[in-house]
Image (cartoon, helix red, strand yellow):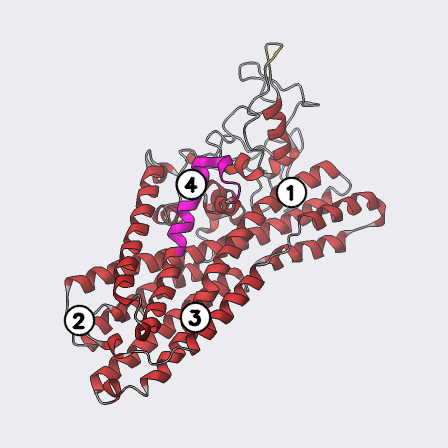
Amino acid sequence: MDKPTDDTAWISCPPEDVEVPRRSENQKWTPSFWAILKFMCLFYHRVVVPRQRVCFSCSVDRFRKRSHAGVVERPERYDAELDPLLVAHEYPDAGNEPHLWDVESRGEMSPLVAQPGPCPVCDALWWNRDGVTERYTEREIGVGRWNHRGSGALSSLLLLGALTLITFDIVNFMGQLWGQPDLILKLMKKMTLYIVLLLYPLLSLCSKLRSLLTSRTPSFQWASALNARYLVKQAQVLDIGNKGLPQKLFFLFCMTTPLLTAVYRFLIFTVISGCGFRTTTILASIVGIIFNQAFGLYLYLFRLLRVSFQRQFNLLTLYFRDHEGEERRCRGAFFSTVVDFHCFKGLVNLSIFVMFPAFVFAISSNLTYQYMLANSPCIIQNPLNMNISHHNLRLAWSEILLSLGSYLVAIGGIQVDYVFNNFVTNLLHLRSSKHRIFWNTLIKDINHVTQDSYFYLVTIIFSFISIFLAFNFSSQDVTDLVVCNTTSLICV
């Protein structure tokens, strides 16, 4: 079989006389990737890699009519939501029905397909890192027993258990601190930590609900980004089979920093404070490690998706260059990519909305606490309390800065819009007068899908509220933060 002369010679659809390459058995994806999906409880559907990936246009044709043995059947699935994300990632049988051109399967053929042969837009859904259509199966990439029977139920139960554990702890300390004006600072310091730890389990459970309820969750489009099908599709352009887990240094950072901060927290609990080893201390430290590791891997998934879309938009730019003027093909590939990108963008925006006010309040409340320590006789006159307070502050600042820094590195900034904006800029450089109508239509499509985000405004408003609250705390009792018989130190 002749090979292409360059990396982009076969972008999307290869010549008719060339066999579409398939992944070999010895190029299985690294087990680390599947271990991350398992630990993060991301498996839900029994089939992660569908037999076929169908573009939205072909899916609409499939949903409308079919012909079987020359008899036109009644239209199918009129009650189904024709949402590109639902069609691609959420429906239980997504991609597992025979293709519209698959005449070997019970003789079925859609009368709406103008000509036989594979759709180039559908082929673009299987691009590898070089823009070559490379189909693969679950066996070929090594899913295996990582997604066993009952994985979806197990993932849902673990997420529910995590949410129940956090909720129980929140209710426990809320009952102790609620309604006491001199303990507001302590209450809010606890809440900032719990909000961040609660973020991923809650969002992941929403993803499971979207997969379960499909069209009955129209506001949860962002939740498809935490679907294993979605993640596998985006990871295919990163060449995991040959290069292993992408962004290894950042992955190592996300795995080690929660462990180090947990060890430091445990030392404050036991050695520095002189409280000794207690069962509750050990259990709290283990649970803290698990939740912090989950948050670190959540940020790693952000970086993996961001790098994946940067690669995919580069391939799409080359695709437009090679197929300039072919409006249907280019628009189909464009919208398939943009729909997935807006799903990722929605998840990032929602995370910003939750995390940044929590970060701002954590910073301002820790500054407030640090200044208030200087006016606390209990702490100033007791060297042990002073030592505990200083270590307590170091731990709090390290957690805040590491979490915020990890997020900025994962996204490459505050928001991820720049990835799409760079792609649009590259397209404008490729625009030529020879295909003026094609480019004018494409620019209109880009303007249509470009969405204004109000998350910046909402985040700024909540951030200012957080600063105002933190610096207006007065007469707060900070001595309770260094008492040995409480669990305050692990929740700063």
Mark 3 and mark 2 lie on one chain; the one further toward the N terminus is 3
User: Alpha-carbon neighbours of circle 2 within 10 Å: few (<14), some, or many (≥20)?
Assistant: few
In this view, the residue farthest toward the bottom is 381
Image spot of residue 96 (x, y percent):
49, 28
Residue type indicated by callout 3: Phe
Q: What separation in Å lies between label 2 and label 4 (alpha carbons)?
A: 40 Å
Mark 3 and mark 1 lie on one chain; the one further toward the N terminus is 1
Image spot of residue 126 (x, y percent):
56, 38
Quadrant assignment, res 25: top left
Of 148 and 6, the residue lying toward us = 148
Of 179 and 232, the residue lying toward us = 179
Tell me the residue that label 1 is attached to.
335
Quadrant assignment, res 172: bottom left
Tell me the residue that label 4 is attached to.
209
Residue 295 visible to the viewer? yes
SS for tag 2?
Answer: loop
User: Alpha-carbon neighbours of circle 3 within 10 Å: few (<14), some, or many (≥20)?
Assistant: many
Give the label, 1 or 2, closer to the camera.
Answer: 2
Residue 485 tag number: 2
Give the label, 3 or 1, closer to the camera.
Answer: 3
Tell me the residue that label 3 is attached to.
361
